[in-house]
Amino acid sequence: MKTTAAADRLKSLIREVKDFPKPGINFYDITTLLKDKIGFKDTIDALQEHYRHDPIDIVVGIEARGYFFAPAMAHAFGAGFVPVRKPKKLPHSVHSVEYELEYGTDTLEMHADAIEPGQNVLIVDDVLATGGTARAVTKLVEMAKGKVAGLGFVIELEFLHGRSKLDRYDVYSLLQY
Ligand code: AMP
């Protein structure tokens, strides 16, 4: 963010919920930011500002909370929006990627024809934690021969070092914890 005061104002709109969804997790609840007229607008404007010199063709949102921000950003850029979804939700041919979780694995899918080769793609989610999810989505974009122009997050949990999994890319977050 441009100033600490602006960042602090947005942080004050984010509700921290201890031990959700399980003990030991401090959950950053962005629904309290979304419902604030000025807070939501400032969030989208500040994310868009960072990429204003990049020609963005597609904004990819990650299910589910990435969907709260990615379509508004796509609208602001005059770009298209593409959803990355959990398995078996998309009706047509998909690219699929499996990635590691703390316990076990998970899968994400994107329509195989969602991105045209060479398109500039911005990936958006609410929180960058360990970076596993975002890394998986970069793979989906590259399977479709899209160019990852950057990854944008509202919140970055710096102590989890998610950025290190994304060091080939431009990673930008508005608020750091
Ligand atoms: P990761 O793959 O570890 O970077 O996790 C990223 C995904 O998990 C994002 O889609 C977030 O929505 C969610 N997430 C992880 N940790 C938190 C947290 N402390 N509060 C809210 N969401 C989180």
Image (cartoon, grey):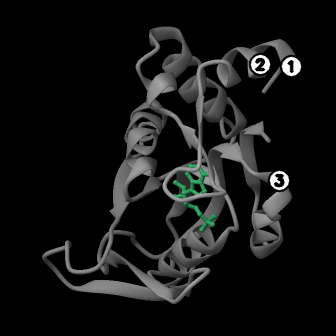
Q: If the image is split into quadrants, where does the C terminus sit?
A: top right
Question: Would you name the residue on which mark 3 appears?
Answer: 158
Residue at 32 percent of width and 72 percent of height: 86
* Mark 3 Cα-neighbour bin, 10 Å: few <14, some 14–19, many ≥20: some
Residue toward you, 112 or 96: 96
x, y percentage for residue 134? Answer: 59, 67
Mark nearer the N terminus (3 vs 1): 1
Question: Would you name the residue on which mark 2 appears?
Answer: 8
Q: Which amino acid does label 2 sit on?
A: Asp
Left or right of 137: which side holds 3? Answer: right
Residue at 38 percent of width and 41 percent of height: 71
Q: How far apart are marks 3 and 1 (CA)?
A: 17 Å
| Above or below, comparing residue 41 to residue 72 in the picture | above
Q: What residue type is labelled 1?
A: Thr
Question: Would you name the residue on which mark 1 appears?
Answer: 4
Element under disc 3: helix
